[in-house]
Amino acid sequence: MDAAGWQDLTSRFRDHLVAERGLAPLTVRNYLTDLDPLREFMSEREIESFAELDRRRVRAYLAWLQQIGYVRTSISRKLSALRTLFRWLNRMEIVEHDPLPARGAFKLDSRLPRFLSQDEAEKLVSAPDPSSEKRIRDRALLELVYAAGLRVSEVGSLNLDSINLESRELMVTGKGSKDRVVLIGQSAKDAISIYLSEVRSAVGGVESEDALFLNRYGNRLSERSIQKIVREYATRAGLGSQVHTHTLRHSFATHMLEGGADLRVVQELLGHSSPATTQIYTHITGKEARQAYMSAHPRAGSGSAPTVNEQDEGADGEDTDSQWPESQQPRQA
């Protein structure tokens, strides 16, 4: 489903929640926010309409939510919003059948998000060689996603004025139309600079001329195309076809924590509203720390490292000054 189709349907659903159910504005906003990941899942899996969401795909969606780091309570809330949506879709005859079973029929397993090792991430972002304009663009895109830990929707909505190469900052619009500033490294800056000077400056569409990433027709690169680019180069790099933009986002968070970044800093860069969402990554880095200790410390004893069952607490991070002009500071939600 394209962005316009999603916007039209969710606008009608919003009207239903307000006019027919009489819900408060905050409750309506929460419903729509809880449906946001579904759009990304449908784009990633190339699902064109809600009619294609059968029970098997709904199960896959819930498993995907766990894989990308949502906790059980959050998934349960999103499932509740999905039930409400499908009841309305069925009543409006947009779908013939409600794919959701009776309450409690879905069992949620505990899973950790998949991420790439640092070597694998390097292979992926280095996979496009600069032999064509398309590959120069693709290299810049991959470098950017990994450098900033962006969602696919955030990448697709970037404009030329979203990026400040001098300060290596991006202005990103995340969930709930909240703006935040994220950072990029030198490798991403170099790749984007080459793309802007050698490729982007020579291409321009009438409707999407402000978009940072364009397709060969000069139009804004779609979320589906972005996912295809990631899968294409993941396959070329020998990483398999199940690598998505969210895999790079997870890898960004994991590698930041492995490098000693504060949990609250990573939370801000990812655009998470709560540190509880970010803490899923402490399961991963905590496990690796324990394995390293058990294998390296002379008095650690024999045997495998213990399983990590508890999440680490993150300390408060320090604020950093943004170099964006005052007129371009993020909007407050």
Image: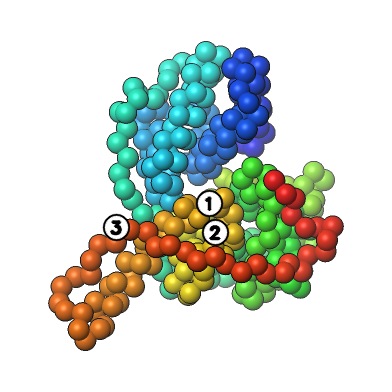
5 up-or-down from 94: above or below? below
Q: Position of residue 263 (x, y in %)?
A: 50, 64
Q: Secondary structure at mark 3?
A: loop
Label 3 crowding class (10 Å Cα cut-off): few <14, some 14-19, many 20+? few
Q: Residue at x 15, y 73 (%)?
A: 303
Disc 1 designates what residue? Answer: 274
Q: Position of residue 214 (x, y in %)?
A: 70, 53
> Relative to residue 96, is residue 1 drawn left or right?
right
Question: Taking the image as drawn, is residue 207 in sight?
Answer: yes
Are the residues tagged 1 and 2 within 8 Å (C-beta)?
A: yes
Task: Please name the amino acid that badge 1 sits on.
Answer: Ser
Residue labelled with disc 2 = 267
The relative height of residue 333 versus residue 161 in the rendered view (above or below) is above
Residue in the foreground of this view, choosing between 98 and 175: 175
Labels 1 and 3 touching (C-beta < 8 A): no
Which residue is at 65% across, 32% downward? 7
Task: List x then y, in percent, for residue 311.
Answer: 37, 59
Instruction: Identify the image quadrant of the N terminus.
Output: top right
Q: Earlier in the sequence, mark 1 or mark 2?
A: 2
- What SS does tag 1 mark? loop
Q: CA distance from mark 1 to mark 2?
A: 7 Å
Residue name at image x 52 percent, y 13 percent: 91
Q: Amino acid at mark 3?
A: Asn
Mark 3 sits on what residue? 309
Which of the marked residues, 3 or 2, is nearer the chain's N terminus? 2
Query: 145 above or below 18?
Result: below
Query: Alpha-carbon distance for marks 3 and 2?
Result: 21 Å
Percent across and percent down for residue 99 are 40, 24
- Give the amino acid at mark 2: Gln
Vertical comparison of 8 with 93: above or below: below
